[in-house]
Image (cartoon, rainbow, N blue to C red):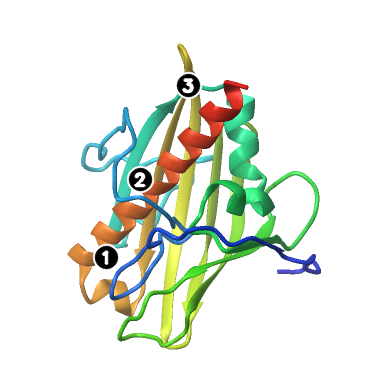
Amino acid sequence: MSATPRTATRRTGTSRTGIRTALLTVPLALGLLGAAVAPAGAVGSPRPGSSLTCHGAGVDPAAQVRHRTGTVIHAPLRTVWQLQTDVERWPDWQSPVRSAERLDSGPLHRGSAFRWTTPLPPNPASTDPVLEITSTVRQLRPGACIRWTGPAVATGLRIDGVHVWTFTEVPGGVLVRTEETHTGPQVDANVPAATAILRQGLEGWLHDLKTAAEARAAR
């Protein structure tokens, strides 16, 4: 990160249990957040060997912990894209995001970095109350896709994530797909549990994005 951080935008919401578990908490920004209920119209896991990409780059092919999902959001593409890329306003519509700050300025672009936090439930890996995630945009095509990477850290805990999002206009709205991988000693020690946590986080994020975008479109 080379840019000077701006003052963090910090808001507190009613947390659901973020990536919540006795072990970790986050679909890193790696995926984070949310409800354990799949959003309406959710698209399931891809066929073996397939992967979402942005400018030809995808998730970590060697990662054991991975999940992919998607949903149709009944809102204009510009609305969905603005919500997803206005990082500092994530706490407005994602209650598991406690704070978010851009480490650069202007519209999100390749090389942009941002730091955000989410509560860390009690777990054997760390006594810290908060998990801090620093994400860097590696690829971006406006209105079409974003790929970012970065670590989620707390004392004694580190998860490295790669996260891809794609946005495709369809009749009546936008098909949003997301795929993420996690690596690190804590997640690799229990792949089924870590995968379930990642799934909950990604589906929760999509649920919140869908709810926020459709509410804004209905105004």
The numbered mark, 2 or 3, whose residue comes first in the sequence reads 3
Q: Is residue 148 left or right of residue 193?
A: right
The numbered mark, 2 or 1, whose residue comes first in the sequence reads 1
Question: What is the x, y in percent for residue 43?
Answer: 30, 32
Residue 141 in view, yes or no = no
Q: Quadrant of the C terminus?
A: top right
The numbered mark, 1 or 3, whose residue comes first in the sequence reads 3
Question: What is the x, y in percent for residue 136?
Answer: 61, 59
Q: Quadrant of the N terminus?
A: bottom right
Q: Amino acid at mark 1?
A: Ala
The residue identified by callout 1 is 194
Residue at (41, 64) in percent of width and height? 26
The image quadrant that residue 11 belongs to is bottom right
Residue 13 in view, yes or no = yes
Q: Amino acid at mark 2?
A: Glu
Q: Is residue 52 left or right of residue 97?
A: left
Residue at (52, 60) in percent of width and height? 149
Instruction: Check disc 1: other Cα within 10 Å, few if <14, some if 14-19, many if 20+.
Output: many
The residue identified by callout 3 is 74
The residue identified by callout 2 is 203
The image quadrant that residue 16 belongs to is bottom left
**Marks 2/1: CA–CA distance:** 14 Å
Q: Is residue 138 left or right of residue 107?
A: left
